[in-house]
Amino acid sequence: MNGRIECDFELPADSPTPYEEYVLSQDYEFRTSTLQYDQATNEFYFHVKTRKVDKKGDTVEIEVSDDTGHQTVLSIDLGVNSLAVASTGTFWSGDEYDHWIQEFEKRRAEMQQRGTQTAHNALLRLGKRERAWRKQYIHTIANEIVEEAIDHDCDVIVFEDLTDIRERLTHANWHHVWAFRRLVEYVEYKAPERGVVVEQVEPDHTSQRCSHTDCGFTHEDNRDGEQFRCLKCGYEINADYNGAKNVGLRYTRKRQHRLRSSPTSGSADAPVDVRITGGTLNGNGYRPTAES
Ligand SMILES: [Zn+2]
């Protein structure tokens, strides 16, 4: 942001270095690089992405970075107004899904009233069609979530644990709950093929907690329908988007705690960034994305 600067790039002492192995190698082609700054440790991390060129001429993407355990997170909040909201600010509305579920239910009710054998057979066919449609619909969203993670260079997609979803989302119907479970299942299946890990965190007042840096004030009156307004700091934000940020922050806190309590698993300062609209967020605050 202060113009071009030149700095030294220290390679690890081991040989072959990741630089020799991947960047200079004929087997890999260079793709992109990003520089990230961790405020807590005042350190920079340089991430280089290369693509493996295999014998068939296809390419496989792998990420090379120094072994800092640095992660960039895409967090997802699931809900009724919006089926899914990503920490990047992308929304998947629940309107179309709800509309078609109602249409299927209407037609089912009509056929059940007729009560004939023909109507019964038609009912079975309708059920089959509805199941196929639901699956297709959720598959599409799952694919888009994985793409969202790839587009924003995220290593991890984080969801909330769904165990008590019925108690937490009292206005969710069974078909919402069905959709949430399938969505997490499909993303868990698809993301690893693209090199993205999927994690779940325990819910922690996701919809009531203020996601503003240094606040975290939690109160049920913070939320009023689709609007979130923190009673303590006055932060205003879309309620579902607030939830998505909180899922990511929850993961950040959990991971930092885990790394601190088990020093062998990596650096205690291994930073985690939650990818949000126009930048990243971690326990130390918000910073804008530097355009590369
Ligand atoms: Zn607040």
Image (cartoon, rainbow, N blue to C red):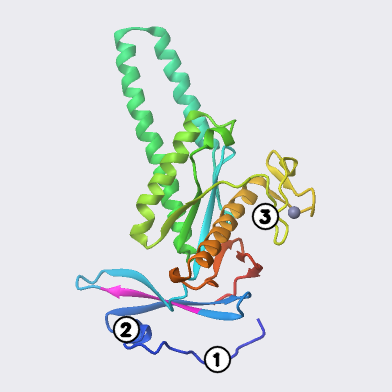
Q: Position of residue 51 (x, y in %)?
A: 34, 74
Label at residue 7:
1
Q: Is 48 one of the magenta-colored residues?
A: yes
The chief SS type of the magenta part is strand
The residue at which mark 3 appears reads as: 211
Residue 279 visible? The answer is no
Disc 3 CB within 8 Å of nearest ligand 1 atom: no
Say whether disc 3 or disc 2 marks the residue closer to the N-terminus.
Answer: 2
Looking at the rendering, the stretch of residues picked out in magenta corresponds to 46-53
Front residue (pair 122, 139) = 139
Q: Where does the image place residue 146, in percent across and percent down from the top left?
A: 43, 55
Is 2 included in the stretch rendered in magenta? no
Q: Which residue is mark 2?
A: 21
Residue 156 in the image: state x and y as whole percent.
46, 60
Type of amino acid at the residue the image marks with label 2: Glu
- Other-residue count near label 2 (Cα within 10 Å), few / some / many at <14 / 14–19 / ≥20: some
Which residue does the image show at 41% across and 51% down from the upper left? 143
Tell me what residue is drawn at x 43 percent, y 79 percent.
Answer: 66
